[in-house]
Image (cartoon, rainbow, N blue to C red):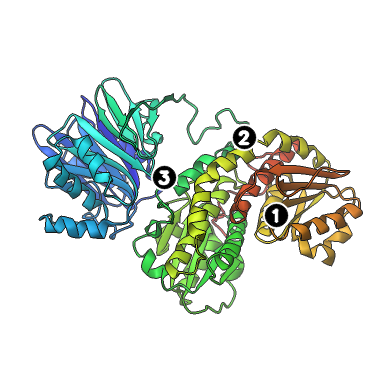
């Protein structure tokens, strides 16, 4: 899995494919390849391990020219990152396929296809798709029809681009669980897994929906939905300025990044969920084997990423029954650590270059961990290169120094890890995985609902602008969310903010509470709610102003000095992700009121690559 580009045109499309791949490099990958059809040479391909520029020089040394082609950057799931495993995969020189996602029943299909005489050249799951289509073309000569028949046999997730030497005027695409977008040109059309890859050639796009199959020709695009009915998909036009490194209509990158969370969370989930379970292979080729041996987890990270790790500890222990320890990297790296047998080392980092986190990973190698997993936003980072397994958070470039979308995509990734480990170890309760997979699919729209409270939170921010201290309270997995809320406020508004587990209030911080110290709490509707309500009474009794972000079903209402902001009801396990959003917005609006440099707060750096 990783990135797809395709083109059908009158001109030579090789350079368009390579440029498209370069624009997908941010996602992280280990090899790249392309296949091009020309009337003279038929289907030809070039593949290289490493960077797209290696592929580019391979094409420069031995040029490929054609008007139809598909290209791919691969992130190994089945089979090591080798040239043989790189896409496109061929069936003879007749059919070529590139694929994002994971085919779960590939072993059974491979055996079946072998008995039909197909010889496999790679260890990938993708190769079954190309031979299957080749086989079906014998009885179903139209390429789109053969792809429609082939996908009926596939279990798992896929975004596919297929070409056939016998039908060189078309490109066929299929989407299920892994995104694809058609780029519309004049007398030429394109396909990609992300519109960014095609901004070089067009600004008009059609997004395929789940289950869609498309036949893309130079002058015509036909799309069929899951039920096989011909459908039209809306054409979306992008204007300059919608690029990732541009603020668009937002006043700050931070606000833009806060608002991107529904779409980046969606992207982090794509290609990683089966019907009712997490696709374990999304963590890499050796994940299933390694996860089966894991009996403990050690998480190491810094800053916001550390808070994500703290939430994960609650999830790993309560949902998957796996003991978990979490520590800031700067402590872990200098401490004498006792490692329990069969412990997986998990590092979490937006940048993948944080000096302490990297040092902790390097030291960890000598400590006898079972293996290492990086949860990271930068595919080409040192942390990713030096870890055994990786799950990329796919939040896209994060420009604001205060981390927002990286945090929520880390949380989503850590929930995937919890479910994957629990699945492989058989420690999840009955129905837990199916329910949470379902809830995860709904999460982007829930986050959208939380963002719709933007103006309410902006109004609430006025309470804080003249304050010098604040207290954030949470219980259970919401305690680290309170810590993250406090960190955001101090980072960008320079107001002193501390987070406490609500039960600790009486053991010290209550002495500070008065009318000048507002208290912020997150109150999902769970078994800790009644206890939290008592803690809030303790604050009110001391004249402290309360801001409560509460589940709409929690039965909390505004009162003297109590400001309740209701959030949509959500499964308790996913509540930490949802409740993060209003806390980010709160810090943002307080900082705007105070006139600070929101995107580049004083004394802080986005990536701390020195000790
Ligand atoms: C810096 C950044 C934070 C970030 C932390 C860890 O302090 O300002 O936003 O959370 O580093 O960075 P990482 O890239 O490892 O997640």
Q: Residues within 10 Å of mark 2 (few under 14, many from 20)?
A: some
Q: Where does label 2 land, which residue?
A: 252
Q: Which of disc 3 and disc 2 is earlier in sequence?
A: 3
Dot 2: element:
loop
Q: Residues within 10 Å of mark 1 (few under 14, many from 20)?
A: many
- Depth-wise, is mark 3 or mark 1 nearer the camera? 1
Dot 1: element:
helix
Q: Which of disc 2 and disc 1 is earlier in sequence?
A: 2
Residue 248 position within the rendered picture, expressed as x and y whole percent measured from the top left? 55, 29
Distance from the alpha carbon under mark 3 to that under mark 1: 31 Å
Outermost residue, left side:
40
Could you tell me if the residues under marks 3 and 1 are in contact, i.e. CB atoms within 8 Å? Answer: no
Q: Is residue 121 visible?
A: no
Residue positioned 19% across, 36% down in the render: 143
Image-quadrant location for residue 151? top left
Residue 582 position within the rendered picture, expressed as x and y whole percent measured from the top left? 67, 43
Q: From the viewer's perspective, tell me whether residue 431 is left or right of residue 252.
A: left
Relative to 201, residue 445 above or below: below
Residue 160 position within the rendered picture, expressed as x and y whole percent measured from the top left? 29, 42
332, 37: nearer the viewer: 37
Residue 515 is tagged as: none
Could you tell me if the residues under marks 1 and 2 are in contact, i.e. CB atoms within 8 Å? Answer: no
Distance from the alpha carbon under mark 2 to that under mark 3: 22 Å
Q: From the viewer's perspective, tell me whether residue 465 is left or right of residue 260.
A: right
Q: Where does label 3 land, which residue?
A: 26
Q: Where does label 1 land, which residue?
A: 482
Label 2 near ligand 1 (CB < 8 Å): no
């Amino acid at each position: 899995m990783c990135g797809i580009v395709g083109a059908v045109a009158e001109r030579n499309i090789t350079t368009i494919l390579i440029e498209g791949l370069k624009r997908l490099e941010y996602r992280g990958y280990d090899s790249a390849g392309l296949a091009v059809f020309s009337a003279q040479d038929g289907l030809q391909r070039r593949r290289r391990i490493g960077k797209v520029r290696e592929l580019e020089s391979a094409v420069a040394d031995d040029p490929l020219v054609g008007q139809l082609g598909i290209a791919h950057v691969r992130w190994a799931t089945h089979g090591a990152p080798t040239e043989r495993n790189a896409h496109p995969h061929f069936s003879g020189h007749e059919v070529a396929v590139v694929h994002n996602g994971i085919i779960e029943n590939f072993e059974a299909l491979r055996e079946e296809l072998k008995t039909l005489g197909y010889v496999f050249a790679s260890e990938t799951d993708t190769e079954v798709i190309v031979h299957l289509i080749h086989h079906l073309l014998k009885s179903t000569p139209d390429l789109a029809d053969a792809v429609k028949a082939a996908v009926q046999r596939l279990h798992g997730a896929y975004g596919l681009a297929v070409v056939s030497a016998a039908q060189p005027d078309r490109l066929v695409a299929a989407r299920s669980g892994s995104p694809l977008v058609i780029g519309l040109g004049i007398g030429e059309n394109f396909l990609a897994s992300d519109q960014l890859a095609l901004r070089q050639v067009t600004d008009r796009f059609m997004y395929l929906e789940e289950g869609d199959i498309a036949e893309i020709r130079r002058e015509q695009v036909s799309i069929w939905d899951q039920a096989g009915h011909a459908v039209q998909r809306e054409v979306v036009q992008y204007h300059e300025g919608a690029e990732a490194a541009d603020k668009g209509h937002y006043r700050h990158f931070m606000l833009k990044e806060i608002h991107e969370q529904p779409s980046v969370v969606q992207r982090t989930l794509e290609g990683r969920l089966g019907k009712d379970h997490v696709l374990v292979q999304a963590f890499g080729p050796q994940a299933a084997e390694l996860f089966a041996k894991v009996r403990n987890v050690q998480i190491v990270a810094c800053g916001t990423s550390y808070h994500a790790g703290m939430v994960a500890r609650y999830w790993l222990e309560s949902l998957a029954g796996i003991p978990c320890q979490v520590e800031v990297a700067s402590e872990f790296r200098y401490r004498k650590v006792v490692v329990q047998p069969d412990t997986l080392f998990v590092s979490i980092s937006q940048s993948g270059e944080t000096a302490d986190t990297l040092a902790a990973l390097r030291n960890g190698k000598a400590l006898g961990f079972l293996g290492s997993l990086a949860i990271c936003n930068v595919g080409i980072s040192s942390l990713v290169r030096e870890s055994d397994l990786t799950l990329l958070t796919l939040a896209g470039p994060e420009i604001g120094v205060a981390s927002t979308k990286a945090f929520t995509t880390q949380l989503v990734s850590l929930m995937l890890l919890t479910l994957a480990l629990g699945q492989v170890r058989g420690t999840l309760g009955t129905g837990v995985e199916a329910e949470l997979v379902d809830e995860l699919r709904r999460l982007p729209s829930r986050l959208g609902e939380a963002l719709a409270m933007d103006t309410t939170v902006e109004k609430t921010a006025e309470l804080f602008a003249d304050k010098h201290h604040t207290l954030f309270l949470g219980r259970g997995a919401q305690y680290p969310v309170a810590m993250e809320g406090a960190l955001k406020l101090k980072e960008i508004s320079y107001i002193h903010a501390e987070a406490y587990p609500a039960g600790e209030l009486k053991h010290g911080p209550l002495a500070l509470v008065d009318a000048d110290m507002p208290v912020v709490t997150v109150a999902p509707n769970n078994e800790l709610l009644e206890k939290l309500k008592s803690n809030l009474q303790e604050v009110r009794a001391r004249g402290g102003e309360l801001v409560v972000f509460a589940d709409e079903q929690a039965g909390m209402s505004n009162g003297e000095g109590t400001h309740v902001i209701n959030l949509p009801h959500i499964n308790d396990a996913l509540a930490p992700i949802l409740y993060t959003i209003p806390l980010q917005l709160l810090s943002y609006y307080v900082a705007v009121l105070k006139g600070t440099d929101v995107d580049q707060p004083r004394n802080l750096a986005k990536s701390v690559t020195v000790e």
